[in-house]
């Protein structure tokens, strides 16, 4: 009798077991490769977001101090200690700067701002020129045009070169004559928070300030110290460190309003971000240094 060829039950069970093991191994390798791919994808995404975030802040830093003198704090760093730092970058949007020709007392109500006096003996506070004969002093005329471009109101910054402090205001109407501006406080503030004597040669700028900070894991900047005017840059940020490299070779983790920003050679930014997926945490850190080029014009 001829013997029939084929697999016995035992051989079939062994073959199925081996196939199952191979399939399990293949699935495990596939899943592991997928996790590695996802982790690399998250790292790449974080790197791209970090680069975009740092470059955005860097563009602002390069323009810091535009049309501002050396005694004005164009760059400030608030050291966060063990937490994230805060960076303040300022630029002046107009070539025209207004002299402040009145005494300002902290706590007094904000009203009109006097910018000239016909018979003043204070430097800079005399009668302002009207070279184009339009009925307005030339600097006031320029600001009136800017105010119109901003929809009828523009932010201005009253600054004391003595205390190095200032306050944001809203220039929203003409004054009672060409020697005054009608101003009001911002963000619900109705009184002066700075003091400045007429002889202190205080002045007002058409200033733009960006305050970079981390709030609830998000890097953002606040415009002109207005809590309602915020631009978000990126999410998942856990740390923001800022250092200023100075001409004498020192490195500062803090720059106050009394520091001379013209001594800054470069500003180093370090951003850290992290994200989680599938029980894993991916963290990346990136640093770059930027040169505030307007120090060359001081």
Image: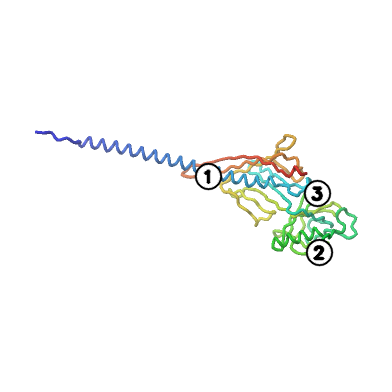
Q: Quadrant of residue 245?
A: top right
Q: Is residue 135 left or right of residue 185?
A: right
Q: Are marks 3 and 1 in contact (CB under 8 Å)?
A: no
Residue 63 in percent (x, y) is at 70, 47
Viewer-proximal residue among 211 and 80: 211
- The C terminus, quarter of image: top right
- The N terminus, quarter of image: top left
Label 1 neighbourhood size at 10 Å, few (<14), some (14-19), many (20+)?
few
**Which residue bears the numbered disc 3?**
161
* Residue 45, numbered label: 1
Say which of marks 3 and 2 sits in front: 2
**Which residue bears the numbered disc 2?**
134
Mark 2 or mark 1, earlier in chain: 1
Residue 205 in percent (x, y) is at 76, 54
In the displayed orientation, state which residue is furthest to the left: 1
Q: Quadrant of residue 150?
A: bottom right
């Amino acid at each position: 009798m001829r013997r029939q060829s084929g697999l016995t039950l035992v051989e079939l069970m062994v073959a199925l077991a081996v196939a199952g093991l191979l399939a399990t191994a293949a699935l495990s390798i596939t899943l592991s490769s997928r996790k590695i791919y996802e982790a690399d994808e998250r790292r790449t995404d974080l790197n791209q977001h970090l680069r975009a975030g740092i470059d955005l802040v860097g563009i602002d830093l390069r323009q810091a101090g535009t049309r501002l003198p050396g005694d004005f704090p164009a760059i400030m760093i608030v050291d966060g200690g063990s937490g994230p730092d805060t960076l303040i970058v300022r630029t002046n949007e107009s070539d025209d700067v207004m002299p402040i020709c009145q005494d300002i007392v902290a706590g007094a109500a904000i009203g009109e701002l006097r910018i000239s006096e016909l018979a003043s003996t204070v430097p800079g506070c005399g009668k302002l020129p009207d070279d184009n004969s339009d009925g307005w002093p030339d600097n006031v005329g320029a600001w009136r045009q800017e105010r119109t471009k901003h929809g009828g109101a523009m932010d201005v910054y009253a600054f004391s070169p003595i205390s190095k402090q200032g306050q944001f205001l809203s220039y929203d109407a003409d004054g009672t004559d060409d020697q005054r501006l009608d101003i009001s406080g911002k963000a619900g503030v109705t009184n002066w928070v700075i003091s400045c004597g007429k002889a202190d040669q205080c002045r007002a700028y058409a200033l733009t300030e960006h305050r970079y900070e981390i709030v609830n894991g998000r890097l953002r900047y606040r415009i002109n110290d207005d809590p309602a005017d915020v631009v978000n840059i990126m999410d998942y940020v856990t740390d923001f460190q800022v250092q200023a490299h100075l001409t004498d070779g020192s490195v500062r983790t803090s720059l106050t309003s009394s520091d001379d920003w013209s001594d800054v050679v470069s500003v180093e930014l370090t951003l850290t971000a992290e994200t989680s997926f599938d029980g894993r945490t991916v963290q990346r850190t990136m640093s770059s240094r930027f040169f505030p080029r307007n120090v060359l014009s001081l």
